Image (cartoon, rainbow, N blue to C red):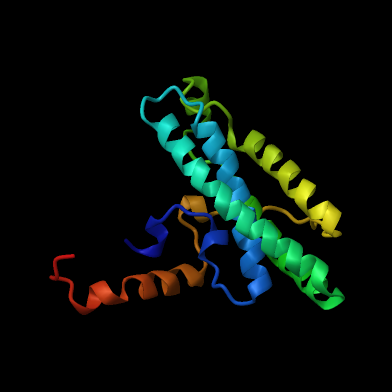
Amino acid sequence: RPPEGFRNAVFLERPNGDWGFSVVRLLLYDLADSVRLEVWSRTPLETIPGLARTLGREEKYHRMYGETWLNRLARATPESHARIQEAVDAAWGEALGLFEPVAGEAHLVEEGLLIEEAARQEKRWRAQVSELFEPLGLRLPSVPPSSGGRLGQHSPDLAALLDEMTSVWRLEPEAKW
């Protein structure tokens, strides 16, 4: 698929770069994923709740890893705290795009297949983020959400990421994996 064929938040296509940014991105995503998995664990669809609960148990360890590194880096030195704050400032707008509503969301809620719309999930996520960040002296910037990725509008970083991820396959497209 070309990059515009993907429906992911732009936040997820950014390169790793600075370790602090990678930790902040990991934790913000894992907290969002935890909220989504909790919602999916309560859907009336037959097989999804069990899968969501299984993934949620694994997600717990991802969150612990991110929280541990965030605490270490935010408390280590004034310089590391400042760098973590810079990472939060850089990531926050695109992190809000994790909750960009998708076409048909209202219909899914109306039919009872999705028990909580993205806006309510985002509110719960923000509360969890604030609970972790405030004791560390990290402030959340007031920026608008960056959206479009879930509609197929991506940064050039996605094309580079897809190129890297498919490089081995392109060497031998006829290979059986």
Q: How many marks?
A: 0
Quarter of the figure that contains the C terminus: bottom left
Q: Residue 94 appears in which quarter of the rendering?
A: bottom right
**Residue 133 vs residue 14, the one in the foreground:** 133
134 relative to 2 in the view: left or right: right
Residue 71 location, x and y as percent? 75, 61
94 relative to 45 in the view: left or right: right
Q: As displayed, is residue 39 above or below residue 71?
A: above
Quarter of the figure that contains the N terminus: bottom left
Residue 151 location, x and y as percent? 48, 50
Residue 114 location, x and y as percent? 50, 28
Is residue 98 among the parts visible in the rendering? no
Q: Residue 133 appears in which quarter of the rendering?
A: bottom right
Is residue 35 among the parts visible in the rendering? yes
Q: As displayed, is residue 41 above or below residue 152?
A: above
Q: Residue at x 77, y 73 (%)?
A: 83
**Residue 14 vs residue 106, the one in the foreground:** 14
Q: Residue at x 50, y 47 (%)?
A: 58
Q: As displayed, is residue 143 above or below residue 174?
A: above
